[in-house]
Amino acid sequence: MSGYVRNLAQAARAAQAAIAAADASTRHALLEGMADRLLAGQDAILEANAGDLERARQGGAGKATLDRLALNPERVRGMAEALREVAAQADPLGEVSRSDVRPNGIRIERQRIPLGLVAMIYEARPNVTAEAAALCLKAGNAVLLRGGSEAAASNAAIAACLHAALRDAGLPEAAVSLVADTAREHVLELLQLTDLIDLAIPRGGESLIRFVAEHARVPVIKHYKGVCHLYVDRAADVDLALGLLVDGKASRPGVCNALETLLVHRDVADAFLPRALAALKARGVEVRGDAGVRAFDAALAPATEDDYAAEFLDLVIAAKLVAGLPEALAHIARFGSDHTEVIATADPAAADAFVRAVRSSAVMVNASSRFNDGGQLGLGAEIGISTTRLHAYGPMGVEALTIERFVVRGEGQVRHPESRAG
Amino acid sequence: MSGYVRNLAQAARAAQAAIAAADASTRHALLEGMADRLLAGQDAILEANAGDLERARQGGAGKATLDRLALNPERVRGMAEALREVAAQADPLGEVSRSDVRPNGIRIERQRIPLGLVAMIYEARPNVTAEAAALCLKAGNAVLLRGGSEAAASNAAIAACLHAALRDAGLPEAAVSLVADTAREHVLELLQLTDLIDLAIPRGGESLIRFVAEHARVPVIKHYKGVCHLYVDRAADVDLALGLLVDGKASRPGVCNALETLLVHRDVADAFLPRALAALKARGVEVRGDAGVRAFDAALAPATEDDYAAEFLDLVIAAKLVAGLPEALAHIARFGSDHTEVIATADPAAADAFVRAVRSSAVMVNASSRFNDGGQLGLGAEIGISTTRLHAYGPMGVEALTIERFVVRGEGQVRHPESRAG
């Protein structure tokens, strides 16, 4: 271990006390200042990003990677907007969620405090650098940012803007610490720092998340793949279901809340499937079906078990006819990833049974899977979407970066009265 | 891997669905039934416990171990009482903590669901077997119980009572699964079952917890030692502070919420320390002091850095004079274990500064450290006291064994309106 990351983490941890001690209005002004500094630094950010893009192209990066990496004035404005939305969120610190007096007169309060130091490990998405920093600071945390090497120059330029805003607010720059040297050995070192890091959040492809999960000694909240299902119930409104299908699969296939599998109740197949297959075909979506689906279009490729387990992140969908809700639930239980499941139905009993039986982080009744997103759910932004059923489940906003503890106020109460004699 | 624990975990996970599906009154009745079955099975439990005690004595177990292991009619009644208290807690499942409508008309609810399968890894405390099972079942979880080998017969007898109650309620016995073979290799296997176990809770000595933390691939909430501090402020009421000191150190020295270090503001030392040292001496407590404290009693042993870091769990306490609140806070930050800290003061400003600066799971103002306990804080019982600032911090009751997820209800809303064309 070189100690490179330990030194960064120690500085960040030391700086966290100042962030936690800053009052709500100071942290609000800090985030607004970060947004202003990002806009003011746009030229430098775009220039750095152009260099990253050029190096990535020379390195033979794929289209998807280049798209995630690319910044432009609109995307920089989007980053600044996201920061202002986080700034506008209710301040979570010091909030007392419960206060009651026990028979012995002690008053018990639950109080929100920051987690401490959060380590964000992500890929070539420069916007995560700004948004993760904003969410962590809003919650009183310091953050250690380790982005993908392809975005190194972009992240450095963004971090420079964030540091300027911290200086403007009279707060320590180290509260946002960038792991500039992206050598993997430093990630390994980071994942062992149990005395300094309270939480590590890996965000990106499955291989990155598995790497972190396998090597981490620090607590980790995983953000695994989204194998999201749409179940079209026998009682579904066909037009409504078509909208959910097209929006879920075709509006942005590369994201984790996109649909990957369509389950259709056989009683509604005649009314729904022909129109569904036509709508998908019209949008260039390849359908892989079971025998029941292929009966509607012999040209379709058969769906394999691998297809049912796959997060295509592309214009591909697996489709299957089911005999009813129980078969749909069994399929989701077997192949789902606890991310997002959708039911289209006009039958409240079917909707309730679906909500009860599905244990995913988000369950949608007659609404698109694409709403499983921090901004769409009212969190302002998200640091990721947890598929770990611990601490946070689903999109993680500001509150998910805090924890409740106990504050007890008394007038000398003791467990054993005889202790009072002193 | 023998697969022994995997088979147990699979059965428990399968059984969990039935517990989660049971309504609140069924789970309430189940816990009352468990209490009844424990009382009815008292003779068998005590006979099994007598065997465990005999084997432990022959094995040369220490007094503390034997005390934790020993059951008697009163302790069995206490177990049954704890189960009834857990039964009486508000039901956490299905509770909707937040519900609001977004501008696009989708209704967003936060809903509590069970974690799933919880693995409890503990030492020779038979009462944990009953209480952990009750807390997990109340929250709709299944539980895998791996207790200490010294308590094997006692745990089996208790589990038999719990299984009878599950049968009475028409629920699967496997929801409470005992890892009867306590070979350590099975703990290692258990800690790798990421596909089956949602949370592992180690409860016991530091070596057990470190072992679990080092080998776990499943999520773990650690329950480390309690190095609890009492800071007697310059503005403290001396009699009140004496009560907190005696209660915190002498009422039950072997527990994690007992005091281990006393920090005294030098301005109150003349009024407080002579009486404090006398009160501790009268209760057989050995005091290890810094130079300032030893100035009040030259016979005291000097306190070393190891003493300041130690969880004595015995009638020993480290004591130190401090120049003021900042020095006390620095000492706690360096030697504390994030468990419980206490301030005795009549000065609200000092109390607030202490609460703000201390980041422990429980901070007590003019109240005993011994109140950091699930029962005392109104949780009915506790599955442990988390010192991990993630998911739960401090005593973990029923709610800490659940997680909130998102339920979205719409009328066909989509992210991209053009999707509606279908």
Image (cartoon, coloured by chain):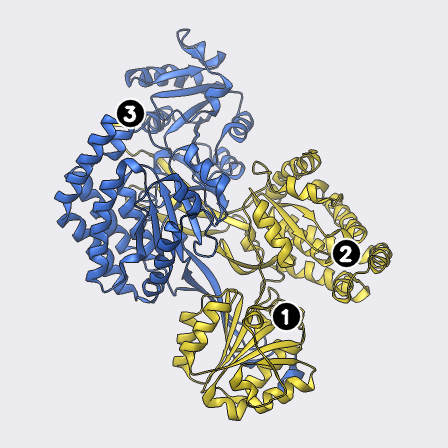
Chain colours: A blue, B yellow
Reading the image, the residue beneath label 3 is A62
Reading the image, the residue beneath label 2 is B36
> Which chain letter matches label 3?
A
Front label number (3 vs 1): 1
Rendering quarter of residue B412: top left
In the picture as drawn, the residue positioned furthest to the front comes out as: A2
Instruction: Judge whether B167 appears above or below B244 on screen.
Output: above
Label 1 sits on a secondary structure element that is loop
> Which chain letter matches label 2?
B
In the picture as drawn, the residue positioned furthest to the bottom comes out as: B271
Q: Position of residue B111 (x, y in %)?
A: 47, 47
Dots 1 and 2 on the same chain: yes
Q: Position of residue A223 (x, y in %)?
A: 43, 39
Q: Earlier in the sequence, mark 1 or mark 2?
A: 2
| Along the viewing direction, whichever of A400 and A194 lies nearer the viewer | A194
Q: Position of residue B24 (x, y in %)?
A: 60, 50
Reading the image, the residue beneath label 1 is B312
Q: Residue at the location (48% across, 13% down)?
A: A292
Front label number (1 vs 2): 1
Q: Residue at the location (38% across, 59% down)?
A: A13
Classify mark 3: residues with Cα within 10 Å, few (<14), some (14-19) or many (20+): few
Q: Amino acid at mark 1?
A: Phe
Q: Amino acid at mark 2?
A: Asp
Q: Which mark is on residue A318?
A: none
| Along the viewing direction, whichever of A357 and B9 lies nearer the viewer | B9
Instruction: Judge whether B361 appears above or below B216 on screen.
Output: below
